[in-house]
């Protein structure tokens, strides 16, 4: 086998391995992209669920912090009452 023929055979084998490696790399990249996309969608669903929960908690907090509800709980559970106007002392710095 001549040197030119041997060089051509090595070059052809090298190119064939390069094409094969490139194909395997493309398949792996597509597989990995699909995995990452699935993970991204799961994270988006979780974010949306947490967002809904956050809004529900904000509504609950606003309901619990209304003045009428606080006054009602103070009267019923703590037996508190509004002081008479003469009992109110204003403290100024």
Image: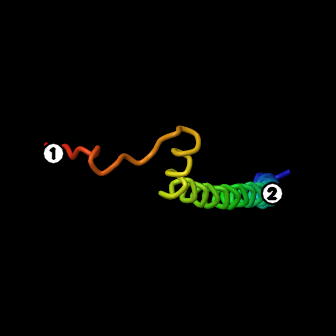
Drawn side of residue 88 relative to residue 79, left or right = left
The local crowd at label 2, few if under 14, some if 14 to 19, many if 20 or more residues have their Cα within 10 Å, is few
Give the number of the disc on residue 18: none
Residue at 78% in and 58% down? 38
Q: Position of residue 78 (x, y in %)?
A: 53, 38
In this rendering, does residue 19 appear at all? no
Q: Position of residue 26 (x, y in %)?
A: 77, 61
Residue at 67% in and 61% down? 52
Residue at 36% in and 46% down? 83
Name the residue that disc number 1 marks.
Answer: 92
When asked about the image quadrant of residue 92, the answer is top left
Nearer to me, 80 or 12: 80
Instruction: Please report whichever mark, 1 or 2, sits nearer to the chain's N-terminal start.
Output: 2
Q: Which residue is most to the top?
A: 78
Asked if the residues shown at circle 1 and circle 2 are in contact, with their CB atoms under 8 angstroms apart, the answer is no
- Of the 4 image quadrants, the one containing the C terminus is top left
For label 1, the SS is loop
Q: Which residue is most to the right?
A: 1
Name the residue that disc number 2 marks.
Answer: 31
């Amino acid at each position: 086998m001549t040197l030119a023929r041997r060089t051509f055979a090595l070059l052809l084998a090298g190119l064939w391995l390069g094409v094969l490696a490139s194909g395997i790399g493309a398949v792996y990249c597509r597989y990995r992209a699909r995995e990452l996309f699935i993970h991204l969608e799961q994270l988006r669903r979780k974010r949306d669920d947490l967002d809904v929960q956050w809004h529900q908690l904000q509504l609950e907090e606003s309901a619990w912090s209304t003045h009428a509800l606080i006054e009602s709980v103070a009267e019923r559970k703590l037996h508190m009452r509004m002081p008479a106007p003469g009992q109110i002392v204003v403290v100024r710095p």
